[in-house]
Image: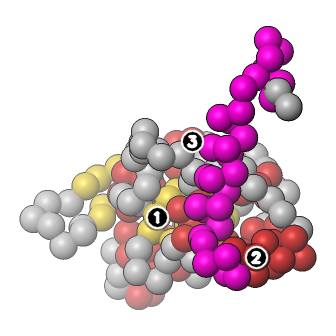
Amino acid sequence: MLYLKYNQQKLMSKSIGFRCPDDIVIEIEKTVQLTGLDKTAVIIEMIKGLQAVSIDDRKKLPRAEAIYLVWTKSKLLYIGQTIDLQRRFASHHRLVSFLEAEARISWFDPSGCDRIEIEEALIDILEPTLNGKIVTEGDKRIQVLLSVDLWKAYRLYCFEQEVSMSDDVRKYITELLSKPRDGNGEALA
């Protein structure tokens, strides 16, 4: 079992552990000996060196098992695990937050490791801001996929009408739902 310490400039450190393949443990230990860094610093440097794509380029993610980290220049937003990284980001429950933050996605292949155990350990030591946070119960956000041409045309329309896209969609849905309905839920003419 590999034990990690992580000091977040607090008065105390946290110790956590998870099983890891021997070759990764050996690599970490070699790096500790060569650099003089502690194991946590080595692991954080390994994370920084992971491949990454912009949230806008999420369709370029591999269709593969992964542990992923979502981050901005200044903070780590989320850590998760999945059996299909590309599919996960096609409908992630935090996608709107990631898009608004102009986040990046890093990932690594957890082959030979327990994905859930590693995910939980990384969340514990790195404390990403959105893990464990409940999606607010107030206004709900929805994601609508539009072709690029349709999105551009709609954005231009809203600009010309001097209304935000969100306000225009909200108005449309409100008007649609305020129409009288028959017994089957169909709008009456």
Amino acid type of the residue that numbered disc 2 sits on in the rendered structure: Tyr
Where residue 179 sits, quadrant-wise, is top right
User: Would you name the residue on which mark 3 appears?
Assistant: 116
Is 167 one of the magenta-colored residues?
A: yes
80 horizontally vs 4: left or right: right
Distance CA(mark 3)–CA(mark 1): 18 Å
Amino acid type of the residue that numbered disc 3 sits on in the rendered structure: Ile
User: Would you name the residue on which mark 1 appears?
Assistant: 77
Q: Nearer the viewer, residue 27 or 86?
A: 86
Question: How would you rate the neighbour count of disc 3 (Cα within 10 Å): few for under 14, some for 14-19, many for 20 or more?
Answer: some
Question: How would you rate the neighbour count of disc 1 (Cα within 10 Å): few for under 14, some for 14-19, many for 20 or more?
Answer: many
Mark 3 or 2, closer to the camera: 2
Dot 1: what SS? strand
Q: Nearer the viewer, residue 41 or 95?
A: 95
Distance CA(mark 3)–CA(mark 2): 46 Å
Looking at this view, name the residue that lies furthest to the front: 189
| Quadrant showing the C terminus | top right
**Residues tagged 3 and 2 counted as in contact (Cβ below 8 A):** no
Counting residues from the start of the chain, the first of labels 1 and 2 encountered is 1
Q: Which range of residues does the magenta coloring cover? A: 159-187
Tell me what residue is drawn at x 52 percent, y 73 percent: 101
Q: Is residue 151 visible?
A: yes
Amino acid type of the residue that numbered disc 1 sits on in the rendered structure: Leu
Looking at this view, name the residue that lies furthest to the top: 183
Q: Nearer the viewer, residue 1 or 128?
A: 128
Residue 157, percent from left and from top: 76, 76
User: Would you name the residue on which mark 2 appears?
Assistant: 157
Q: Nearer the viewer, residue 64 or 21?
A: 64
Counting residues from the start of the chain, the first of labels 3 and 2 encountered is 3
Residue 126, percent from left and from top: 38, 62
